[in-house]
C-alpha cells in the first residue's frame, strides 16, 4: 500500500484534532504518536479505506513556547526516520494543512510567519491553509485575503500556498434551535487528494465513496443533536403552538442537512425543503401521528413530557427522512422536482411504526416525572428508537 502523508500544524486550540476527526471520523485508526518516554507531540492516524490510503499526522499546538514548536517538529522528523528504518517506503510529508482560526484573523500574520519558519524542513511541500471555526460566512472573503497577504510576505515560502479552505469541522450551536452546520470538509478532502504527488492520488470514485461516508456520519451526528434539542425545547411549555416550535427546529435541521449534501439554494430546493417541513408539521400524516401519540391509552403523564416525546420524535424522523432524500438528490438518483416521491417518503416515515415507537418511549418515561428531569432521557430513548445507523 502506498500512503500519502498529511501534516497538520497550527497554534494550540485552533481545532486541528477536531478537523482530523471530521475528515476521518470512524474511518480512522490510531497508529500512535511519540515513543514512550518521549514527549507525546504527535498522533498518526490512518484512513481505514484501502482505496483512499492516507495518513494524517496531528501535532500538538505550537503556542505558547518555541520549545513546544521545536518538539512538535522534532517528533514529526523522528516519526519519519523511525518509520523509514522499519521499512516504511512512504515517510515523506506530501501535503501540509496549515490551520489558522477563523475567529482570530488578527493573529493570522504572526501565526503564518511562525508556521512557515517551522516548516522550512518541508520547503517544497504544498500547503493548504485551513481556516478553522469559520462560522461567519460574511467574514470568509476577508479572512482568505488576510491569509493570502500574510503568505505573500513569506518570500520563497509563498509559492507553497496552494489553497485556502474555510471549514466548520463540527456543528456550532448558536442557540437552542440554531446552529452552523459542518462545512468545507469535502473541499479539503478533494484538495488534499489533488495535491498529492503522482502515485499517491486516489481514484475519483473512491474519493467520492469516502466523502459519502463522511456526509452520512455528519448527517447522523446532526440529527442526533437536533433530536436532543427537540426533546429539550419540547419539554418546556411553549407560549406558541406546537407546530411553530416544531417547524422552527425542523427548518434549521433540514437546512443544515441540505448544506451537508451540497443542495444549492434556488427555487427548486426551496420548494423541496418547504415540502419536507410541511410534511413534518401540518400535513395530514403529521397531524394524525400527533393525535395518535396524544391518545395513547393508559398513560397519565404531564402534557409537556408528551410534547417532548413528540418534538424529539418528529425532529428525529424528519431528519432521517430528509437526509435520505438529500442523499438521493446528491447522488443523482432523484431530482428536486420529485415532490410526489418526497411526500410519499416522508409520509411512510411518519406511518411505518412511528406512533408505536413513540408510544414505547412514553411508556418508558415514568409517570409523575417532571419534564425537566426527563428531557435527557427522552432524547436518548428517541435516538435509540429512530436514529438508525
Ligand atoms: N463547534 C465547533 N467546535 C470546534 C470546531 N473546531 C474546534 N472546536 C473546538 O475548539 C476546541 C479546540 O479544538 P481542538 O481540535 O482540540 O484544537 P487543537 O488545535 O487540536 O488543540 P491542541 O491539540 O491543544 O493544539 C475544542 O473545544 C473543540 O471542540 C468546530 O469546527 N466546531
Ligand atoms: Mg489537538
Image (cartoon, helix red, strand yellow):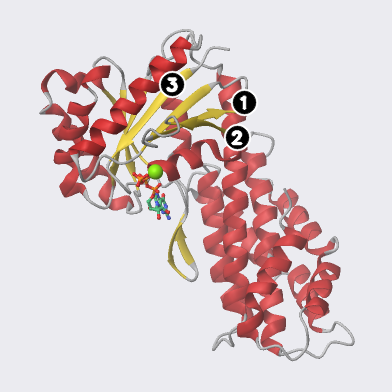
Residue 149 seen anywhere in this rendered image of the structure: yes
Q: Is mark 2 on a helix, strand or loop?
A: helix
Real-space Cα distance between discs 3 and 2? Answer: 16 Å
Q: Which residue is drawn at 42% across and 42% down?
A: 17
Residue 5 numbered tag: 3
Q: Are marks 2 and 1 in contact (CB under 8 Å)?
A: yes
Position of residue 203 relative to residue 149, above or below, is: above
Local crowd size for mark 3, using a 10 Å CA cut-off: few (<14), some (14–19), many (≥20)? many
Q: Residue placed farthest to the right in the image?
A: 297
> Is residue 30 found left or right of 297 in the rendered image?
left
Q: Which residue is drawn at 58% across and 41% down?
A: 215
Q: Residue at x 26, y 14 (%)?
A: 124
Q: Is mark 3 on a helix, strand or loop?
A: strand
Assess mark 2: CB under 8 A from ligand 1? no
Q: Name which quarter of the figure residue 98 lies in.
A: top left
> Is residue 179 found left or right of 353 in the rendered image?
left
Position of residue 250 relative to residue 28, above or below, is: below
Position of residue 150 relative to residue 158, above or below, is: below
Position of residue 145 relative to residue 53, above or below, is: below
Q: Residue at x 66, y 86 (%)?
A: 304
- For disc 2, the marked residue is 27
Local crowd size for mark 1, using a 10 Å CA cut-off: few (<14), some (14–19), many (≥20)? some
State which tag comes first along the sequence, 2 or 1: 2
Q: What element carries label 1?
A: loop
- Residue 180 appears at what percent x and percent y? 43, 56
Residue 49 numbered tag: 1
Residue nearest the viewer, comparing 261 with 146: 146
Amino acid at each position: 500500500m502506498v500512503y500519502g502523508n498529511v501534516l497538520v500544524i497550527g497554534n494550540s486550540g485552533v481545532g486541528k484534532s477536531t478537523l482530523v476527526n471530521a475528515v476521518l471520523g470512524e474511518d480512522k485508526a490510531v497508529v500512535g504518536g511519540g515513543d514512550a518516554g518521549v514527549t507525546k507531540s504527535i498522533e498518526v492516524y490512518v484512513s481505514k479505506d484501502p482505496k483512499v490510503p492516507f495518513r494524517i499526522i496531528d501535532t500538538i499546538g505550537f503556542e505558547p513556547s518555541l520549545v513546544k514548536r521545536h518538539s512538535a517538529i522534532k517528533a514529526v522528523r523522528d516519526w519519519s526516520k523511525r518509520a523509514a528504518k522499519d521499512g516504511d517506503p512512504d515517510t515523506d510529508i506530501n501535503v501540509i494543512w496549515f490551520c489558522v482560526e477563523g475567529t482570530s484573523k488578527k493573529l493570522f500574520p504572526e501565526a503564518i510567519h511562525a508556521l512557515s519558519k517551522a516548516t522550512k524542513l518541508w520547503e517544497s511541500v504544498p500547503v493548504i491553509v485551513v481556516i478553522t471555526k469559520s462560522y461567519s460566512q460574511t467574514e470568509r472573503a476577508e479572512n482568505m485575503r488576510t491569509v493570502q497577504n500574510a503568505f505573500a510576505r513569506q518570500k520563497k515560502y509563498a509559492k507553497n500556498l496552494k489553497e485556502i479552505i474555510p471549514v466548520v469541522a463540527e456543528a456550532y450551536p448558536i442557540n437552542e434551535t440554531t446552529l452552523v452546520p459542518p462545512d468545507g470538509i469535502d473541499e479539503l478532502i478533494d484538495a488534499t487528494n489533488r495535491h498529492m504527488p503522482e502515485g499517491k492520488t486516489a481514484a475519483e470514485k473512491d474519493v467520492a465513496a469516502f466523502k459519502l461516508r463522511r456526509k452520512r456520519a455528519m448527517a447522523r451526528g446532526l440529527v442526533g443533536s437536533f433530536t436532543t434539542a427537540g426533546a429539550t425545547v419540547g419539554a418546556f411549555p411553549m407560549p406558541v403552538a406546537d407546530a411553530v416550535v416544531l417547524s422552527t427546529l425542523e427548518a434549521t435541521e433540514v437546512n443544515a442537512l441540505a448544506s451537508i449534501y451540497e443542495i444549492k439554494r434556488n427555487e427548486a430546493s426551496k420548494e423541496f425543503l418547504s415540502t419536507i417541513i410541511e410534511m413534518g408539521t401540518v400535513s395530514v400524516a403529521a397531524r394524525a401521528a400527533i393525535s395518535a401519540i396524544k391518545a395513547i391509552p393508559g398513560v397519565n403523564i404531564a402534557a409537556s413530557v408528551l410534547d417532548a416525546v413528540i418534538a424529539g420524535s418528529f425532529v428525529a424522523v424528519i431528519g432521517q427522512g430528509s437526509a435520505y432524500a438529500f442523499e438521493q438528490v446528491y447522488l443523482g438518483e432523484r431530482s428536486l422536482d420529485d415532490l410526489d416521491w418526497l411526500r410519499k417518503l416522508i409520509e411512510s416515515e411518519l406511518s411505518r411504526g412511528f406512533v408505536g415507537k413513540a408510544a414505547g418511549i412514553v411508556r418508558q418515561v415514568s409517570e409523575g416525572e417532571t419534564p425537566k428531569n426527563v428531557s435527557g432521557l427522552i432524547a436518548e430513548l428517541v435516538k435509540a428508537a429512530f436514529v438508525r445507523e
